[in-house]
Image: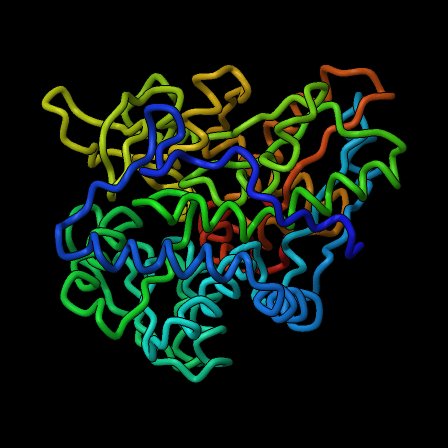
Amino acid sequence: MKDIYDLEIKHPPDAGGHFGMFGGRFAAETLMQPLQEIEDAFFAAWADPKFHDERMDLLHNYVGRATPLYHAQHLTAAVGGAQIYLKREDLNHTGAHKVNNTIGQALLARRMGKKKVIAETGAGQHGVATATVAAMFDMQCDIYMGREDIRRQAPNVFRMKLLGANVVPVDSGNATLKDAVNEALRVWVASCEDTYYIFGTAAGPHPFPLMVRQFHAVIGQEARAQCLAQAGKLPDVAVACVGGGSNAMGLLHPLRDDASVRLVAVEAGGHGLDTAEHAASLAKGKPGIIHGSLSYVLADAEGQISADAHSISAGLDYPGVGPELAYMMDEGRLELDSATDEEALQAFQTLTRAEGIIPALESSHALAAGMRIAASMDEDKVVLINLSGRGDKDLGTVMDLLDLADDGQTP
């Protein structure tokens, strides 16, 4: 598998961090120099074979890469239509794709001499992955998390604390992911001299969208080679859920130049795209600036970032999206889909019963759309779905929603 990891930076942003009109670096003046230092450090590290030797050693021997590509034959039979393959990012150490990025950024922080890292988190997986690498590298770690997400992601909060991280509740706004990012950026302004911000998704000010994409590209690079080996062809459709965009960029970007592959981004439909309670920034948003980057955002008539963004999944509950995904959509390379809370919950149950795999609620959105797409295609076609995380963290939420009886059976 070693030969499939391509280190070329394909489709880079311009010198200002723009993908077309999107991206850039819209940040407080005090952050401009730290962001430039991170950019310089990243490009220096990316050109250093020793950096990649250590990164890949950790990804293989600590994280557990390469993750399997699983032909979900029982799910395929239940759905009908195309063959469904699952990229098993849920089998990574810490339970999701997020650790690909935190390994890379922690190595970068260490190269820069930083002793402390901070991060934001929604579903808690990025927080756990950050706390994990901080423990391994003996770094102080603060994780900013909305109070609402702390409530609905209690298992991951406990994991972060076990790992030695300080979990800082955020009560502003909706007390969810957007507000956690706001607070982490505010704190970083005052502490950037000795603190590195491990940004968790392919959004934010340049160079974070590029860095996060590059650190997650292993997902799609592996999946591409695995699909050729197992199915004898490239996938006809590749599907990933989208909040900020880290797992989506990881799977879809390495397939971007394969014109025969449809690339599908699945947004959180919440209570429906005809309501205000969803998180479909690409489908329903408009260009605006969020967390230091120009992209599509959910905003009110006055241009203020929407307080109504909603998803059953804490990791998708975000009123913006990464700039490169916005650019890929505008240039016609990215197809949009969505799944409502109800559809995601149904997909969660379907995969669990069909394959004995319990997915994260984030991944369940990709499953819902991927299953729907597969059902409309012939059986000789291949649908590749990124199973970005496992569902341990969501069991409390799902149990409340399904009102499971003591015997474990749904009513």
Image coordinates of residue 293 in percent, x first then y, are 28, 38
Q: Say whether residue 155 is visible.
A: no
* Res 120 → quadrant: bottom left
Q: Residue furthest bottom?
A: 138
* Res 196 → quadrant: bottom left
Image quarter hosting the C terminus: top right
Q: Residue at x 28, y 21 (%)?
A: 286
Image coordinates of residue 306 in percent, x first then y, are 21, 32
Q: Is residue 223 above or below residue 404?
A: above
Nearer to the camera, 409 or 179:
179
Q: Is residue 349 above or below residue 259?
A: below
Nearer to the camera, 57 or 42:
42
Q: Residue at x 88, y 40 (%)?
A: 230
Q: Residue at x 81, y 44 (%)?
A: 226
* Res 1 → quadrant: bottom right
Q: Residue at x 81, y 22 (%)?
A: 381
Image coordinates of residue 205 in percent, x first then y, are 30, 45
